[in-house]
Image (cartoon, coloured by chain):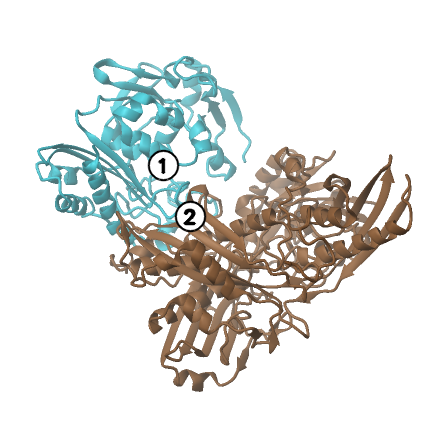
Chain colours: A brown, B cyan
Amino acid sequence: MKFPRMDMPVSGEHIGAPVVRVDARKKVTGQADYAAERHIPDLAHGVVLGAMIGAGTIKRIDIKAALALPGVLDVITHENRGTVHRAKGSMLMGMVDDSRGVLAGDRVTYCGQPVAFVVAETFEQAMHAATEVFVEYEEDPPILTAETATKQIEPKRFMGEKLQYERGKTDQAMATAAVTIDETYETPSEHPTPMEPHGVIAMWTKDELHIRNATQWVMGDRGVLARVFRMWPGKVHIHAPYLGGMFGSKATTGGHVILAALAAKRLARPVKCVLSRQAVLQTVGHRPRTVQRFAIGAAADGKLLAMRHTTTTHTSQQDDYIEPTNLTSRHLYTVENYASSLEVKRLNVVMPGWMRAPGEAPCQYAHECAIDELAVALGMDPIELRRINDGDKDLGRDLPYSSKHLMQCFERGAQRFGWERRSSKPGTRRDGHVLVGYGTATATYPGNAFGAKVRARLERVNGRPRAILDCMSSDVGTGLYTVITAIAAETLNLPLADIEVKLGSTDHSYGPVAGGSGLTAAIGPAVYSACTKLAAKRAKQELRDGDVIKASAFTAPVMGADRHHTYQSFGAVFAEVTVDPELGMVRVRRMTGVYDAGRIMNPRTARSQLLGGLTFGIGMALLEELIPDPAHGRFINTDLAEYKVPVHADMPDLDVSFVEEPDLAFNSLGCRGVGEIGLTGAPAAIANAVYNATGKRIRDLPITVAKVLVGRTDTT
Amino acid sequence: MKPFRYLAATGGASDFAVLTDPTTHVLAGGTGLVDLMKLGVQTPETVLDLAALAPIGRPPRDEGGDFARIADGEDGDLFVGALVRNSTLAYDERVRTRYPVLAEALLSGASAQLRNLATLGGNLMQRTRCPYFRATDLPCNKRVVASGCGAIAGVHRGHAILGTSPSCIATHPSDMCVALAILEPTLVIATANEPRTIPFDELHLLPGDTPHRETTLAPGELILGMVLPAPLPRAKQRYLKVRDRASYEFALASAAVQLVIHDKTVIDARIGLGGVAAIPWRASAAEELLEGKPATRASFQAAAELALAHAHPLRDNAFKVDLAISTIVRALELAAEAP
């Protein structure tokens, strides 16, 4: 029996089956209704003009020439914007990238900060007019690196978890260790830059605001806009039926959304604003650079005795974005004596933002490279080192894991990958011009469920029963429509085609942000519960044409743990790389990932997410880096030719499978999310494989040709 | 994008009248010009669209004028019209067999979609990818005369180490041109009067203190095509491109090489370099050193080191010196090993 405690069919027809995306046809035929793709009569187009300096004051802003151009309808600046109501960002009420408000004053604190919003009849007219707005600045020297920053914060908590944390006696235990390593790892600023750029259409009907926005959090947008425009939230309607990716970057309500709504109000006509790729990369929050130091002490038998993990990262001058890198290292392995700290430097940059596995992805890179280095220092197989320190208890919270199968992942993964063929001596396997290396790392991500309410109704039309379900949350492209459809069809014993799922609108029943890998675990059990109620009602009463049966259900939020358990997903990632030692080129030949993420609701869409996660990991390991110009902090690689993400030629054979153990303590379906775990672990597995291939440890990402060759070259 | 006047070329004398105005820009495939117009880097008053002379989708050998044709010339020459698409050129059987280095270089550049649009003429006239050139809010001597070079003190890890000047360290981005540097085609330039011809190596200008001047073309002139001379007998060619991403990225370093080897001795050597130089680079001194030497790694290494002897690296692109040397050596080895 695979799911002994489930009171539903063990081998579901739809649940756990590779159901094809219900929106696949719409998407490939262009019928999917993306937020800013709609054409509305009388639509005006807005373009944000960003500051060209990193810090300073606007002395003068001249909009006369722009206003005189054909088609130009309005140019909004801090001088003519009118009263600004601020909306401070909040994890409950919606997040903003600048708590001062947009166009709120003459102070510029980052390059790309909006200084004007130009609205015209056409997009091209608005683009051109933006170049005819003349801004005179008094420039201050901007602070662009953590090393030169003078202001910093040492945040105490993130979502309730302590960020400055110690247990046991780290220094004393470290001193008794037979083997220690102490190394510093860097990850650069990276950008989520999804394929669909950030875009919005705003329009007003009387005193109500209607927004179509590429957002992963309709309630967040509602919260921000209601506060900015001083409105009853119920009069703000946000719609996001489909998204073309987000990776965290569409949870924050961008300044362009507020400006589009403001312009629509001033002009009394709908306004569209779609950010250019350059604007997305420059002004939508990036993952901040991290510098992480790991000191680890172990006994000669590999038992971890002490660990110290310190991180330096950055945020903007006025807002406190925190990349929480040290929440995982405190509990991933059993180490009694542990200390970690996090300091955040204030720079002249846009407020950084969420990017797939925020905190976990950089942490797992550094942590799992450090573990690999320790295994080398101990002369031990890196999987064996992880086995020795594997435990069933979260020492950070002093709670048992609800369901942990990390070593099963390693065992299965090692077999599928052929780990036994790894050469334990680095730099010794050659294949023609290239060196070949194997690497591995642990992947992990919390089991989150942000809480949701689902409404379901069953009706009969022309003798045929059909069900309609709704929830506010957006399907960001991962397959939520499909998973809900499958659960409902299975529970109500209806064909997939007779289930209609409505998502991505504040007009629906409460649903959370599409983030934290927590949607399936939040909404899935609510769908199951609501449909179970519907099925029970239907059993008691005959359903005739015109009849409607309604039910709803909600799930409570769980953020990685409750009083009884820590909920956490795990995985083992393996990578084979080749390194050309003369030309410096690193290529990934193949990867294997085995994941313990509870019950897999749909192996097709889950596998897709993990393939995407591993691919994202290749990008983080080898390619991605947002590069600021040292003069103003303007990023110089703001297009997809120069901000490098993997292309098809970079994608090798990726082998993804699951250790499918339902986590029934977590929820009634036993599922945890898979949106982010695929990224964690992958960069470290690749970096460890580069070491295995070359014997050279490159401790700052991305691992580029230039870095592989350093040592062969005199750099000054 | 700044508003502009659009004119479709007719192939007649009126085109040249329009072209003599320096504010007229020529549109061929559009993969470069349209991007730069969107960025505000190029702001033509008039865009003269050559598409009418070689419509996309028609077989290029059968339609259009000389602009769009690949045609066999005398003595094994091959004429290639300026509007021949990169993909057409790369997959042409004569190019694949007689000038494999050109096909390899073309296929290592851009993406399939871009190559289906990009033309020979556009690629010859391709602008640099230097980020300072492409951003109107950053200084660039190439874009705005005497505005300064942002890259020298700024980010220059991808920049050139050969042929640079205190005014400009931008790289020439084309892969195709590196292959052409060793194939030595003659360019046919249409003018209002009679066409003139120039050797390929007389097209591109070193930046010096006038980096805004990139080619020797005068206003009113238009590249009509090129004539590739017949290949040397028994010549072995190779294009090797080094980059972080496996595809869709400009070269960190690339080498186009051609070797004629007899009795294990190099009879004729040609070495072109890309990704490291201000213009498509020909390593003539290295070629001379190699000729008459045994076709061994040691000879290749000595030649490659000579090719980079006058390199001028900066803080963050010093790795390119060794990388370019390794790239030349590997390309020569691969060419020498070829059957």
**Would you identify the image quadrant in which residue A711 lies?**
bottom left
User: Which of the numbered marks, if any, corresponds to residue B45?
Assistant: none
Q: Can residue A268 be seen at all in this image of the molecule?
A: no
Circles 2 and 1 on the same chain: yes
In the rendered image, the vertical position of residue A236 relative to residue B294, given as above or below: below
Position in image of residue B214 (x %, y %): 33, 35
Whether residue A152 sits left or right of residue A106 in the image: it is left
Position in image of residue A175 (x %, y %): 39, 85
Q: Quadrant of the N terminus of chain A?
A: bottom right
In the rendered image, the vertical position of residue A541 relative to residue A710, given as above or below: above
User: Which of the numbered marks, if any, corresponds to residue B139?
Assistant: 2
Position in image of residue A6 (x %, y %): 71, 59
In the rendered image, the vertical position of residue B214 relative to residue A588, given as above or below: above
Whether residue A642 sits left or right of residue B75 in the image: it is right
In what element is the residue under mark 2?
A: loop
**Would you identify the image quadrant in which residue A499 lies?**
top right
Q: Chain of mark 2?
A: B
Whether residue B219 sits left or right of residue B228 in the image: it is right
Q: Chain of mark 1?
A: B
In the rendered image, the vertical position of residue A397 relative to residue B74, given as above or below: below
Q: Amino acid at mark 1?
A: Ser
Residue drawn at point x = 42 percent, y = 82 percent: A174
Position in image of residue A77 (x %, y %): 65, 50
Task: Report crowding for label 1: few under 14, some 14 to 19, many 20 or more residues within 10 A (C-alpha).
Answer: many
Q: Amino acid at mark 2?
A: Pro
Mark 2 to mark 1 CA distance (whole Å): 30 Å
Residue wearing tag 1: B108
Residues B163 and B256: in front is: B256
Whether residue B64 sits left or right of residue B260 in the image: it is right
**Would you identify the image quadrant in which residue A648 lies?**
top left
Q: Can residue B119 be seen at all in this image of the molecule?
A: yes
